[in-house]
Image: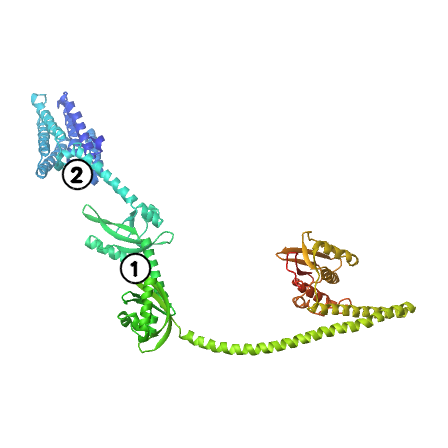
């Protein structure tokens, strides 16, 4: 029986039966109280009866006083007493009279407990148990009362009583145990299927509870009345981020702020007082990583043995709902703020003319109160002479879906304010509404008047200015023509005497053999050549400025043209130790005046060589872009400042380095500019600063581009 259900009471009874069987079997086989064996007889009888009497006593005590939880302690005490009595009898420490007295006392107590069992349970097993105890007691007394020194038939009377007692006790095992008798006497000894079934159901119930506890999607936690956590399900651990061991060391204060903590303990006091929580409470708990989670909690009391031992809380994650509520609130506040921040008035009314919504601006501008507007028709905001027209506009808007119109809004005090209104139809639950805004046109109307006046004044000023501009333009054209004529005439007038002077200086230099005059002739020659060059370029620039100058366009291979210019100037490059690199391809064809294009390259090359250091390099590059080709001439010369870059194409401008150079007229680059512009292109220069070289760029039409004259 013990091996079946591990009940310590059954183990104590089994040990008692075993000791009794050994003892009385030995007595039955002929062990008598004769001669010197009488002492051993009493010792054997006393030790054999003790374990069974103690087992019956402890079993009845446990059952009557509900000491199930202390059964392990009772069993250890039982083993200690049985072992002690064995040693005591073995060494003869206590004599038989003392032993008989305490066994009689225990037997008397057991009889009393048996009577109580009959009164309490009123079943047949309790009666049989009482009869077994009576026969055990009679057997014990009769066995101890035998005083003969020889074996007689009467010596077997105690043994018969013992066997009768065993029969009554054994009968208890086979008596059926009904549902109402599970606490009765036979429950002390029998293996009850009901208890097995009950235990199985209990385990299944615990298993189902654990499965439900851990598989529930809501947070379930158990805590004491001080807010200390005792357990939590898997959902709680997952959401909070704590392990089961960690959460058992936490308190409410680890999850809630001070305000929520006071509310939580108020709820605990309410549950402790009333036994239940009246309504769920919302909290914002803090997870392990600091994340805030909104939950709704309802708690109940856990009762064991009629006592309130703990609380169980179920928390529903309402984070999404609260976020949605907060989003709705933000959108509502945003909508309210947006409506109130509109620069004009907002109106929203139904097809019957009842105002549903409006903004504060409508109240301020119309001077009507909120109560006035809620009880008035929208047409009452307009003048009597406008109501019929506005009514038609509203009806049309309800039919077509939208409208725009201008009208004067009439305030409560009769003030007329011009407004520009828009309206849109809305259909909500099968009912039409008109929503729209109105913009105050007072400032706009005033601005229109001011703009109209300003426009009239500006038109008058423009008319007068055009007359003045035309007059000044005619004067400037006249001056420019006079300048060009003067320069052209001056050039011819200067050019005519220069030829004879040059020839005369050559003859004088040839005839004069005085070496001292040679330097004078060189100075005269250099200066007269400078004047000649200046006159030629001045005439050339004047011709380029003239609108009558025409270009002779032809298709030119740009790479070949640059190679020709390089060949023409190769001695110049050799003398100045300049390297030339032409990166152009044969596919670049431009449409240009060949002589003018050659002049551009000659001027740019001359300029680059003049301002390059010894052993410098000049690089030619070009790229085609739509209708133009962009050509670049890059040198490693002295570079330019920003001021020099801005003025380099001005007529007669010279940089500091060429200010006293007789080979520079200050007209080469301006001539390049006029030639490029005559072709419809543009020219510019780039430099990173002094000593860092310069790159001259100009654009020229390709053979597909439009030719300009």
Q: Position of residue 379 (x, y in %)?
A: 30, 71
Residue 522 is drawn in which quadrant? Answer: bottom right
Identify the residue shown where x is 12% and y is 34%: 178
Element type at mark 1 = strand
Is residue 256 visible in the rendered structure shown here?
Answer: no
**The N terminus sits in image quarter:** top left
Q: Position of residue 222 (x, y in %)?
A: 27, 48
Residue in the foreground of this view, choosing between 440 and 316: 440
Residue 199 relative to residue 609: left or right? left
Is residue 265 visible in the rendered structure shown here?
Answer: yes
Residue 192 drawn above or below residue 636: above
Identify the residue shown where x is 7% and y is 23%: 154
Residue 610 drawn above or below residue 363: above
Which mark is drawn over residue 428? 1
Residue in the foreground of this view, choosing between 606 and 243: 606
Q: Position of residue 356 (x, y in %)?
A: 29, 66
């Amino acid at each position: 029986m013990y091996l079946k259900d591990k009940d310590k009471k059954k183990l104590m009874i089994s040990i008692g039966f075993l000791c009794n069987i050994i003892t009385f079997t030995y007595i039955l086989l002929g062990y008598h109280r004769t001669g010197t064996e009488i002492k051993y007889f009493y010792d054997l009888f006393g030790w054999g009866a003790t374990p069974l009497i103690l087992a019956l006593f402890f079993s009845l005590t446990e059952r009557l006083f509900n000491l199930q939880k202390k059964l392990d302690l009772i069993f250890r005490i039982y083993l200690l007493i049985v072992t002690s009595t064995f040693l005591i009898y073995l060494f003869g420490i206590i004599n038989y009279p003392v032993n008989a007295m305490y066994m009689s006392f225990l037997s008397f107590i057991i009889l009393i407990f048996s009577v109580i069992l009959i009164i309490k349970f009123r079943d047949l097993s309790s009666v049989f148990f009482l009869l077994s105890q009576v026969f055990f007691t009679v057997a014990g007394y009769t066995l101890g009362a035998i005083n003969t020194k020889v074996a007689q038939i009467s010596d077997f009377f105690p043994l018969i009583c013992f066997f009768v007692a065993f029969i009554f006790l054994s009968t208890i095992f086979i008596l059926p145990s009904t549902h109402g008798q599970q606490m009765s006497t036979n429950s002390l000894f029998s293996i009850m299927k009901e208890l097995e079934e009950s235990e199985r159901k209990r385990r299944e119930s615990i298993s189902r509870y654990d499965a439900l506890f851990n598989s529930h999607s809501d947070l379930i936690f158990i805590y004491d009345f001080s807010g200390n956590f005792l357990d939590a399900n898997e959902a709680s651990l997952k959401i909070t981020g704590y392990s089961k061991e960690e959460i058992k060391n936490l308190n409410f204060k680890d999850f809630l702020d001070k305000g929520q903590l006071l509310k939580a303990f108020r709820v605990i006091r309410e549950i402790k007082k009333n036994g239940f929580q009246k309504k769920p409470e919302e909290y914002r708990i803090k997870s392990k990583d600091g994340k805030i989670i909104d939950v709704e909690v309802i708690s109940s009391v856990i009762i064991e043995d009629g006592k309130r031992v703990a609380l169980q809380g179920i928390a529903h994650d309402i984070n999404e709902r609260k976020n949605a509520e907060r989003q709705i609130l933000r959108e509502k506040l945003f909508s309210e703020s947006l409506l109130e921040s509109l620069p004009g008035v907002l109106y929203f009314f139904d097809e019957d003319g009842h105002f549903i919504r409006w903004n504060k601006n409508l109240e301020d501008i119309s001077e009507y109160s909120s109560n006035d507007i809620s009880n008035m028709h929208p047409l009452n905001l307009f003048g009597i002479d406008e109501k019929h027209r506005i009514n038609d506009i509203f009806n049309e808007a309800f039919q077509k879906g939208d409208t725009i119109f201008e009208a004067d809004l009439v305030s409560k005090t009769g003030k007329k304010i011009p407004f520009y209104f828009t309206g849109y139809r809305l259909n909500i639950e099968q009912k039409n509404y008109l929503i729209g805004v109105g913009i105050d046109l007072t400032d706009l109307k005033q601005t229109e008047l001011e703009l109209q006046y300003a426009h009239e004044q500006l038109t008058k000023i423009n008319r007068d200015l055009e007359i003045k501009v035309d007059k000044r333009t005619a004067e400037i054209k006249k001056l420019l023509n006079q300048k060009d004529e003067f320069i052209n005439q001056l050039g011819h007038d200067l050019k005519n005497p220069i030829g004879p002077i040059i020839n005369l200086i050559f003859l004088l230099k040839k005839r004069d053999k005085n070496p001292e005059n040679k330097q004078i002739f060189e100075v005269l020659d250099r200066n007269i050549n400078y004047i000649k060059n200046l006159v030629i370029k001045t005439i050339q620039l004047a011709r380029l400025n003239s609108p009558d100058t025409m270009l002779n366009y032809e298709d030119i291979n740009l790479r070949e043209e640059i190679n020709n210019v390089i060949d023409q100037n190769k001695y110049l490059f050799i003398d100045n130790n300049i390297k030339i690199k032409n990166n152009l391809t044969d596919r670049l064809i431009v449409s240009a005046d060949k002589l003018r294009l050659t002049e551009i390259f000659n001027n740019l090359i001359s300029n680059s060589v003049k301002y390059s250091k010894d052993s410098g390099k000049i690089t030619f590059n070009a790229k085609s872009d739509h209708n133009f080709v962009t050509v670049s001439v890059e040198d490693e010369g002295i570079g330019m400042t920003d001021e020099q870059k801005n003025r380099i194409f001005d007529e007669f401008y010279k940089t500091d380095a060429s200010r006293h150079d007789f080979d520079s007229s200050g007209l080469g680059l301006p001539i390049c500019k006029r030639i490029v512009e005559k072709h419809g292109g543009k020219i510019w220069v780039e430099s990173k600063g002094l000593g860092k070289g310069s790159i001259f760029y100009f654009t020229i039409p390709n053979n597909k581009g439009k030719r300009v004259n």
